[in-house]
Amino acid sequence: MATPVPADAIEPFAAPSVFESIASIYGFLADRRKQVIAAVAVPLGLAFIVLLLTLRYYFSTLAVYLALHDVRTASHAVSATVVGLLLWLLLNVIACGRLTRLVAGEPPQPWFDIRPHALEATINAAVLRFLLVLVAAGALAAELATAGARLVEPAESGLVVVSCLAALAAFAFVFVVRCGLLLPALSYHRRRQILRRGWEYSGERFWHFAAVATIAVLLPSFLLQFLGEIGAQFLVADHGEAAARTFAEAAAILAKDGAEILVVAFTLSISSAVCLTLWTIASGLIYRSLTEAG
């Protein structure tokens, strides 16, 4: 395991260029593609199954609730959805941990060994704290938008909401770049105060990290999701009229038609798998370049 290097011991100019960072990420992916696939295939495949079952159960119970307005059904839907999403998150964390070890130079793990270890526990705790901050920021933005809309004229309430959404998006991007980009690598090398360490490391390298995260990680993931959405429109074109119906009827159609839910789950799984893979590789390689240069 690499010896930790204090964030302030690395000079700002020590980081490689944006082009070199992006080239190293995709170079690693190309050179080690078989090992990368072996590291993430099983946990991400199981994550897809969990997401598919979660969505199917959610829309089935949602259709029942909208038809009968049964509070117990709504409670079951929420509980099962939360459990399903937490399990989906855990499987993604396991894939992240397996890939983090590979990027750090450890021998590849057996493809069927998906037991969570200390690294996965560290990553999971850091991710939950990371998501908690984003949820709190979203709740604060919603509260500010609601309060601000009451203080202005109705014609200007839309501008208040848009301003709060823009501020939330800007905060989320900065927080993701500064505290999220190095999260897997810091979980492996430092294990404590992951978010604070990430904030320190990215202080004078924000624009470098932002460019790498945007070009190498976010753009490919969003592009895949966008193309998947377009493909889904053609695959489920027979139910295109559902958009003009009531919400209850649309939920009923989704509950009965497994093909639409399958397409949604597959599209989300592919884009999130690409994002997780590129993010984990970028985290490990950037941290290694910083510590070696330092």
Image (spheres, rainbow, N blue to C red):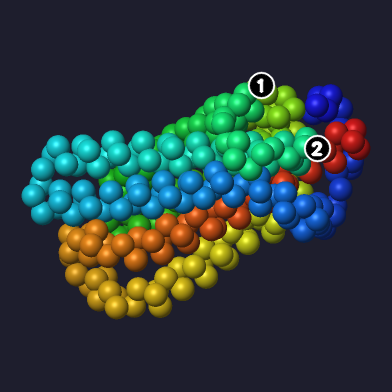
In this image, 267 relative to 192: left or right?
Answer: left
In this image, 38 relative to 232: left or right?
Answer: right
| Image spot of residue 259 (x, y percent) | 34, 66
Determine whether 49 is above or below 78 in the image.
below
**Which one is earlier in the sequence, the residue at label 2 or at label 1?**
2
- Residues 156 and 216: in front is 216
Determine whether 87 is above or below 237 in the image.
above
Task: Indicate the quadrant containing the C terminus: top left, top right, bottom left or bottom right.
Answer: top right
- Residue under label 1: 192
The residue at 35%/47% (across/down) is: 54
- Residues 88 and 111: in front is 111
The residue at 21%/37% (across/down) is: 75
Amino acid on which disc 2 is placed: Gly
In this image, 35 relative to 125: left or right?
Answer: right
Q: Is residue 178 visible?
A: no
Determine whether 220 is above or below 16 in the image.
below
Amino acid on which disc 1 is placed: Arg
| Image spot of residue 175 (x, y percent) | 59, 40
The label shown at residue 105 is 2
Q: Local crowd at mark 1 within 10 Å, few (<14), some, or many (≥20)?
A: few
Q: Secondary structure at mark 1?
A: loop
Q: Local crowd at mark 2 within 10 Å, few (<14), some, or many (≥20)?
A: few
| Image spot of residue 37 (x, y percent) | 66, 52
